Amino acid sequence: MSTLLTLPGQEAPSTAPVGTWLKMPAVEPAQIAAFAGFDFVIIDLEHTLLTLESAYRSIAVSAPSGVAPLVRVPDHAPATIQRVLDAGAHGVLAPRVDSVDAAVAVARAARFPPHGDRGAGGTSRAGNWGLRPTTDYLGFRPLVIPQIESERAVAAAPDILALDEVDAVFVGAADLGLSAGLAANDPTLVEMVDSVLDAAAAAGKPCGLAFGADAEAGARAAAKGAAFVVLANDTTLLALAARQLVADYRAS
């Protein structure tokens, strides 16, 4: 897991790998995230109007800049999953995976036969435009990370994590709370998140959590067992920095 959330030749981070969401239709945020020290980025096709072309360009600059690219796909459509992986993404986060069957379907879309149904596109970026040895191209295993975002998904999490096809899970706490009608600080929601962390630990697989621009919350989650942490996003980081700069100027 950590080898795909970092890059070949880089040392694994001493803390849980940390990433950020990319929501802007530009390549600069991926480069800035790399230069800032993030280990990975997640290009968000679910909650933005980013196109596949925007994602393609961000993926293209990520690894050369020093940050591993993942993509949160908007749905479970095999065509979308195949295209972002052909573009060179290291893996996909799939939203609203509520069952074993849904997790298997996502994994099969991401893997080549006999383990899946993905078509070979060795002349794509993922295949180094046809120059990557076929065995390497077909042997690369992209990350498949189902998102746990409902009470049904929490109940299914142990079985989802038991699948060989699944590499990790990611708890979408905001959507989980929304679906359960619980506030972010409700003890019941905290217990549900903790139960997924426990299930991941029992399965020997990573579980990731996301936070806003709150480094301390991320560090607490890592100490609690989160194997990777997502902090803020490119638009929020820009907004916070801009507001603080103006406030500092007016106060000086």
Image (cartoon, rainbow, N blue to C red):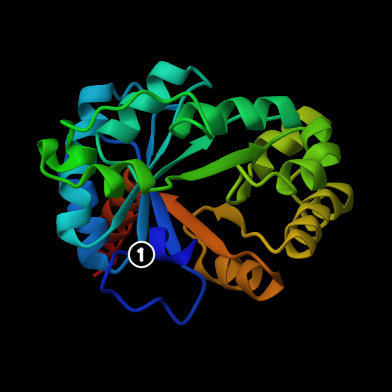
Residue 80: image location, x then y, percent: 39, 21
- Left or right of 208 on screen, residue 155: right
Q: Mark 1: few, some, or many residues within 10 Å (few <14, many ≥20)?
A: many
Residue 142: image location, x then y, percent: 42, 45
Residue furthest to the bottom: 14
- Left or right of 228 on screen, residue 38: left
Quarter occupied by residue 222: bottom right
What's the residue at 64%, 72% (across, down)? 220
Look at the picture and state if 103 lies above or below 64: above
Callout count: 1
Look at the picture and state if 5 lies above or below 121: below
Q: Secondary structure at mark 1?
A: loop
Please state which of residues 101 and 96 is positioned toward the viewer in this rendering.
101
Quarter occupied by residue 50: top left
Residue 107: image location, x then y, percent: 55, 34
Look at the picture and state if 128 lies above or below 25: below
What's the residue at 46%, 19% (across, down)? 78
What's the residue at 73%, 41% (across, down)? 160
Residue 217: image location, x then y, percent: 60, 66
Please state which of residues 64 and 104 is positioned toward the viewer in this rendering.
104
- Left or right of 36 on screen, residue 113: right
What kind of residue is marked 1? Thr
The residue to which callout 1 is attached is 6
Look at the picture and state if 181 lies above or below 80: below
Q: Dividing the image into 4 quarters, which one contains the C terminus? A: bottom left
What's the residue at 75%, 38% (across, down)? 177
Residue 203 visible in image: yes
Residue 181 visible in image: no
Please state which of residues 246 and 22 is positioned toward the viewer in this rendering.
22
